[in-house]
Image: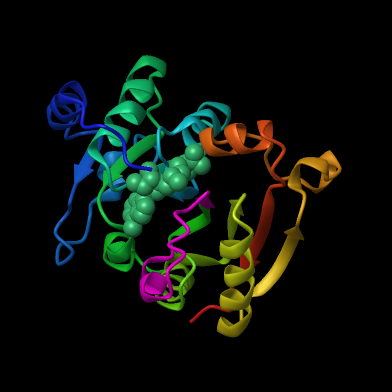
Amino acid sequence: MRLRNKPWAVKLVSDHPEAVLQDPDPQQPIAWNSRFSHPEQPLELEIGSGKGHFITTLAAQHPERNYVAIELQTTAAGIILRTKLEQNLTNLQILRGDAAQLAHFFPAASAAVIYLNFSDPWPKARHEKRRLTYASFLAAYQQILLPTGHLEFKTDNSGLFAYSLQSFNQYGANFDFVSVDLHHEPVERLTTNIETEYEHKFAAKGHPIYALHASFEPK
Ligand code: SAM
């Protein structure tokens, strides 16, 4: 999803460095503790948050947890920031940057949950390394997740889902939950029922939603 560049979003993001980190230097550790009012709370990350409906809703529902939305596009980061400011979500930070650098952005064993929602499928074989479920990303997730942590992935793209099942399996991850029709699972099997923007759009068109939850042996 490429959003049209919105000048108001560029300005809003640059006016709020306390809320948005932009392209942080991968050589410098990020002082997350000073960016949250309650740094002792569990940390959850969403990679590729888009306009942020999922993570802002989750952050509003769970003030007892801290959240970071990681997003490449400034316009999307600006939309997430606008919601954060409107709702005074002090437990949400935004990282405007590339998840390819993830292992530099968070300490080892620091995140309780990582969410990947409707990640770009990159269907061409020559773009495999850009998929957020490619082995190099799984290695970063394994590193930054707590030993008790886990990852939750959902998509409407059957090709990306099949690829991801194989990629997690080859990597040696444990599957805690797999669904080929998330919207028809009994509610007690779900950890959250918050829809993302893409999910809302594709489910309305009748597409099944695929999901998996995975955990890793600590490195
Ligand atoms: N998660 C949202 C949803 O479900 O509605 C947005 C899905 S959209 C298809 C994928 C989003 O991931 C885009 O906003 C894109 O900019 C972001 N993205 C893709 N690759 C990324 C990367 N390497 N690092 C950070 N964000 C990324």
Which quadrant holds residue 151? Answer: bottom right
Q: Is residue 121 magenta?
A: yes
Which quadrant holds residue 3? Answer: top left
In the rendered image, residue 129, in percent from the top left (x then y), is placed at: 38, 73
Which quadrant holds residue 212? Answer: bottom right
Specify the segment rendered in magenta.
116-131
Residue occupying image coordinates x 58% and y 69%:
164
Residue occupying image coordinates x 30% and y 47%:
33
In the rendered image, residue 196, in percent from the top left (x then y), is placed at: 55, 36
- Nearer to us in this view, 180 or 62: 180
Q: Is residue 58 magenta?
A: no
Residue occupying image coordinates x 23% and y 55%:
30
Q: How is the image coloured?
A: rainbow
Is residue 12 visible to us here? yes
Residue occupying image coordinates x 38% and y 19%:
88
Count up the numbered dots: 0
Q: Is residue 166 above or below residue 80?
A: below
